[in-house]
Amino acid sequence: MTTSTRGADKVPAVLVLEDGRIFRGRAYGAVGETFGEAVFSTGMTGYQETLTDPSYHRQVVVMTAPHVGNTGVNDEDAESKRIWVSGYVVRDPARVPSNWRSRRTLDEELAAQGVVGISGVDTRALTRHLRERGAMRVGIFSGNALPDEGTMLAEVRQAPEMQGADLSAEVATKEAYVVPAQGEKKFTVAAVDLGIKGMTPYRMAERGIEVHVLPATATVDDVYAVNPDGVFFSNGPGDPATADHPVSVMRGVLERGTPLFGICFGNQILGRALGFGTFKLKYGHRGINQPVQDRTTGKVEVTAHNHGFAVDAPLDKVSDTPFGRAEVSHVCLNDNVVEGLQLLDKPAFSVQYHPEAAAGPHDAAYLFDRFVKLMEGQRA
């Protein structure tokens, strides 16, 4: 990616999809070129959390909401220390942000972090195209001396694909750190960082959990060196079919019978650890309005999602696995994609969506309480 930032809003920009479809607009954020997988997010709010979610590493995010940037950027809502998206596509960016917490404009933040974006694009047409054709590689090019269309398309087609990408170690912490419990410490959890969002250990700390966040390269011995009452596997980017090391670590945890909770990528890791396959969705689930049913209670939740891969597990029966019986606990009501797994003979479960959802909705926050109950039961 090459970037500059001066006068970006007046600079022409071009978005080129790998199937040859082209959209023209104006530069938004940094000026230059960038590549990634084109995906769309249906959230009408929470764009700062989206941008700083490590799960969006190497993805160019198209916002379906037409107006973006209205609340500016603040210093509190980031989910990590930087923006992770490879590029950003909006229709009508806010000219002036209006929020008492705002410290700078979204355009300024994108430019400061070197994120190449494009505005003035018909994002409805682009989203419909991605829904019909599927997520695909894309490039954003901006500047007064743009390459010809053939050159841009060739560069897009040379970019790496998401399928087969092993990315979690690129976004995870390099050194372990601790998030202390709020109030009385009740439990210790070892959290394997595959691209963890800052709100996740915070939600656990609220419940009296001291969270030891470990690198993606952590071993089973590293996990148990903190003497955990429970083990957590986080969200993260990339293809779960490449995540052999986290799968091996999770199997070690399952063998010991320690209470286990996984979110998003962690759900896919549990699926693989149990012997299920994974597959790439046509265009994925991204946004904060996805309906999911908790099949253990029948309750329907409105949930936050960000995943392009899913677990291939049977919806209509209990499965036998090397670690006992397992079943699909949650399912997406839009397309019947597996949204959660649970073991019936060991204290382990996972969900494909995001119960920590800082920008909301908070329908699924009870899942952290379910994890606490598992640890309480194990201790008793």
Image: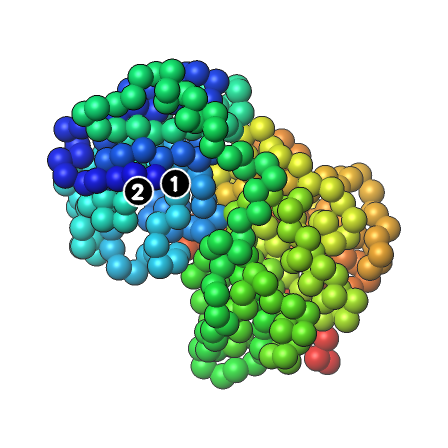
Neighbours of disc 1 within 10 Å: few (<14), some (14-19), many (20+): many
Residue drawn where x is 64% and y is 47% of the image: 242
Residue on which the image places disc 1: 86
Which of pointers 1 and 2 lies earlier in the amino acid sequence? 1
Quadrant of the drawing holding the C terminus = bottom right
Please say if 380 is above or below 202.
below
Please say if 4 is above or below 234.
above
Residue drawn where x is 39% and y is 58% of the image: 80
Give the residue type at disc 2.
Val
The image quadrant that residue 249 belongs to is bottom right
| Residue 245 falls left or right of residue 196 | right
Labelled disc at residue 115 = 2
Picture coordinates of residue 60 (x, y %)? Answer: 40, 36
Given residues 166 and 331, the one toward you in this image is 166
Picture coordinates of residue 101 (x, y %)? Answer: 21, 56
Labelled disc at residue 112 = none
Given residues 244 and 298, the one toward you in this image is 244
The image quadrant that residue 373 belongs to is bottom right
| Residue 25 falls left or right of residue 41 | left
In the structure shown, which secondary structural element does the residue marked by tag 1 occupy? loop
Please say if 296 is above or below 377.
above
